[in-house]
């Protein structure tokens, strides 16, 4: 829609309160968020209008922690100095208000530290992608360096003439490096163009949510400067060795012939090293691509541990229409009762945050009974979800021992919890956790009895390691924002209209948030996102392989051109074409074998990194190397076979006249 220049001064009603528009921010302004794009901004003094708990005043109530704080340090102030000052303030708060500030410390963390937390998998993918992209760049650089070395041979007479006319060696090196720089800059510009195309492709990737969430894919100044710097470094890396070698030739031989190299075995060692590096890095890239592909598919084969099909999901937050705690409990009670009577609904459940959802799980601090606490810790922590009694049935999560929650687990009943199998094995190995207790927030906290052990499922990521988890009943741990899960006997989308009618009958002003099938959420989180990552890594591997093929073909073809006269003599004295083919192929086979051995070691190292950061496959995936290594050898040997085949057909009369 076109913008309205007269919007300033207009009245907008938000949450039942009139607001006057006093300004318009730029569309690209992200505020304090990275992925969220707010539609409007209000003064902090008016924040109580949108507070999730309007009965509290977060300016005065110290136990109300709705605000997040970001700050910019003063010039000359270090992070450690800011941390020390906040630590002193936190100690003062704890001393003055021990009831609400006990064990509440303070820390200063940079945005980089917050984005690289161990529980955030996004930066781990970024590190792996960056490393693999640099490996492709190195393969490309070594390929170009090999081509420049071969090209230097054809320019031997030109360089000799320039030296004979008085050109200085340093001036010739500058000339050749300038040529390399031009090539690198052209390649860098082409890469930037490809990067813009990739950004346009990634910008089409949408997150299934009704909130204004946008992944900020863009080519900013830092990326452009980094690309320019890499282009310059590539020019130096690719062109320095050929430039130095080109200026070391013998003037007399160079003026007599256009075919001059350094004497002895040193003439090809540089090209051979480059080809070995190409093959090894290409093998490592292919191994990484196949490892990620197999890890991705293995996570899909393992499943999530719960039934995700035929489930409709919708979220509610009665606080948006100023419900208090009693009204919220009544709304959810009536909602679940009525939707269970809708035709086609097999079961219904409430959960604070469904598995693989977009929100972070809460954390509970506890002390297990009978567990020896370490000296440096007062409590353990675990992710927690608040659910009702229909949750395990609706998602099909088996209760392995004990029971799930019942309607009798009310607010006045003794506190109970269900833990997953990983939690039970962690704190009571070899024993039955049912009937055990843990205490909330410390050794003297409220005791909670474990009444059931549920099967461990995947909560945050499909590639995550098994983690401890605690479930609390909604009646004993009430929450305002909840997600409703409806299991359908058929197409879950057929329940959308009946659900809207039920909610409208309860309160026509209460909005439904994020209504979608659970299958859509799973497809985004577990399939589409990782699939893009696998395709990117596969593309890097394919590019690396093509570069290695080109490099090996070039060095073998160059070797054939250097030995044309020798091959002609061998044929003239009786060598058969198969002998010539075997002679030339042996050179390529030696390079491929050496590169394969080094590439295997690099592949093992990359696999350990990926296991520790992503898929945790454990050990060595032999199947990947049984597939990648023979394929790599076959393809690269085909690249060497073409010039070898040409060499076996050389006519002796033509070869003996070759200069």
Image (tube, rainbow, N blue to C red):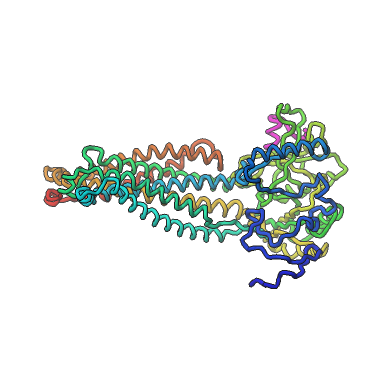
Name the one closer to the observer, 465 or 420: 465
Name the one closer to the observer, 536 or 331: 536
Q: Does 422 appear in magenta?
A: yes
| 286 left or right, relative to 368 | left
Q: Residue at x 53, y 53 (%)?
A: 532
Q: Is residue 140 visible?
A: no
Q: Does 91 appear in magenta?
A: no
| 281 left or right, relative to 404 | left
Q: x and y percent of residue 414 in the render?
A: 85, 39
| 41 left or right, relative to 221 | right
Residue 27 sits in which quadrant? bottom right
Task: Please report the bounds of the magenta region as a residue range.
Answer: 421-438
Residue 519 sits in which quadrant? bottom right
| 135 left or right, relative to 382 | left
In the rendered image, which quarter contains the N terminus? bottom right
Name the one closer to the observer, 252 or 484: 252
Q: x and y percent of residue 641 in the render?
A: 28, 48
Q: x and y percent of residue 503 in the render?
A: 79, 62
Name the one closer to the observer, 125 or 648: 125
Residue 221 lies, with reference to residue 121, above or below; the image says below
- Count of numbered circles in the view: 0
Q: Can residue 106 be seen in this view?
A: yes
Q: x and y percent of residue 486 in the render?
A: 73, 56
């Amino acid at each position: 829609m076109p913008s309205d220049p007269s919007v300033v001064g207009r009245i907008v009603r938000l949450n039942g309160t009139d607001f006057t528009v006093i300004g318009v921010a730029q569309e690209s302004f992200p505020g304090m968020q990275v992925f969220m794009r707010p539609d409007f901004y209000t003064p902090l003094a008016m924040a109580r209008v949108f507070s999730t708990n309007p009965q509290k005043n977060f300016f005065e109530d110290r136990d109300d922690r709705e605000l997040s704080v970001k700050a910019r340090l003063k010039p000359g102030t270090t992070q450690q100095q800011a941390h020390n000052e906040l630590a002193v303030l936190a100690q003062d708060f704890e001393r003055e208000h021990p009831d609400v500030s006990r064990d509440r410390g303070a820390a200063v963390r940079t945005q980089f530290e917050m984005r690289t937390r161990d529980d955030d998998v996004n930066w781990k993918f970024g590190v792996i992608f960056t490393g693999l992209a640099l490996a492709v760049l190195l393969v490309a650089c070594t390929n170009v360096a090999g081509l420049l070395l071969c090209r230097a041979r054809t320019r031997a007479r030109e360089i000799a003439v320039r030296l004979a006319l008085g050109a200085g060696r340093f001036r010739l090196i500058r000339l050749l490096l300038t040529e390399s720089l031009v090539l690198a800059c052209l390649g860098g510009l082409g890469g930037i163009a490809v990067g813009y195309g990739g950004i346009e492709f990634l910008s089409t990737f949408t997150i299934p949510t009704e909130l204004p969430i946008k992944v900020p894919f863009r080519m900013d100044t830092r990326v452009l400067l980094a690309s320019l710097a890499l282009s310059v470094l590539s020019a130096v890396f690719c062109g320095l060795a050929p430039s130095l070698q080109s200026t070391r030739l013998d003037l007399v031989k160079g003026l007599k012939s256009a075919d001059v190299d350094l004497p002895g075995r040193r003439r090809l060692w540089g090209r051979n090293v480059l080809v070995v590096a190409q093959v090894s890095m290409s093998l490592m890239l292919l191994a990484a691509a196949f490892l990620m592909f197999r890890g991705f598919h293995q996570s899909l084969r393992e499943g999530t541990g719960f039934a995700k099909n035929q489930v409709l999901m919708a979220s509610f937050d009665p606080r948006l229409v100023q419900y208090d705690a009693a009204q919220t409990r009544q709304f959810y009670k009536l909602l679940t009762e009525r939707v269970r009577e809708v035709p086609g609904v097999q079961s219904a459940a409430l959960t604070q945050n469904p598995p693989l959802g977009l929100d972070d799980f809460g954390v509970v601090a506890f002390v297990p009974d009978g567990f020896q606490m370490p000296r440096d810790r007062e409590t353990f922590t675990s992710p927690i979800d608040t659910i009702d009694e229909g949750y395990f049935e609706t998602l099909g999560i088996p209760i392995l021992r004990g029971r799930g929650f019942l309607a009798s687990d009310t607010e006045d009943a003794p506190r109970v919890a269900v833990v997953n199998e990983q939690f039970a094995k962690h704190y009571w190995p070899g024993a039955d956790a049912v009937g055990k207790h843990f205490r909330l927030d410390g050794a003297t906290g409220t005791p909670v009895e474990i009444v059931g052990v549920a099967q461990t499922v995947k909560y945050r990521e499909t590639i995550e390691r098994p983690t401890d988890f605690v479930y609390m009943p909604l009646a004993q741990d009430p929450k305002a924002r909840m997600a409703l899960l409806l299991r359908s006997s058929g197409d879950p989308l057929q329940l959308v209209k009946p659900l809207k009618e039920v909610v409208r009958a309860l309160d026509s002003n209460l909005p439904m948030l994020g209504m979608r099938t659970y299958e859509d959420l799973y497809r985004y989180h577990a399939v589409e996102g990782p699939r893009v990552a696998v395709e990117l890594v596969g593309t890097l591997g394919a590019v690396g392989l093509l570069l290695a093929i080109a490099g090996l073909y070039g060095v073998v073809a160059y070797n054939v051109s250097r030995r044309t006269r020798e091959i002609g003599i061998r044929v003239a004295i009786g060598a058969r074409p198969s002998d010539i083919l075997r002679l030339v192929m042996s050179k390529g086979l030696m390079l491929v074998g050496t590169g394969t051995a080094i590439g295997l070691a690099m592949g093992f190292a990359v696999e350990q990194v990926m296991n520790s950061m992503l898929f945790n496959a454990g050990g060595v995936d032999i199947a990947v190397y049984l597939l990648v290594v023979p394929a790599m050898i076959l393809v690269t040997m085909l690249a060497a076979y073409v010039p070898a085949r040409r060499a076996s057909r050389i006519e002796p009369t033509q070869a003996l006249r070759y200069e």
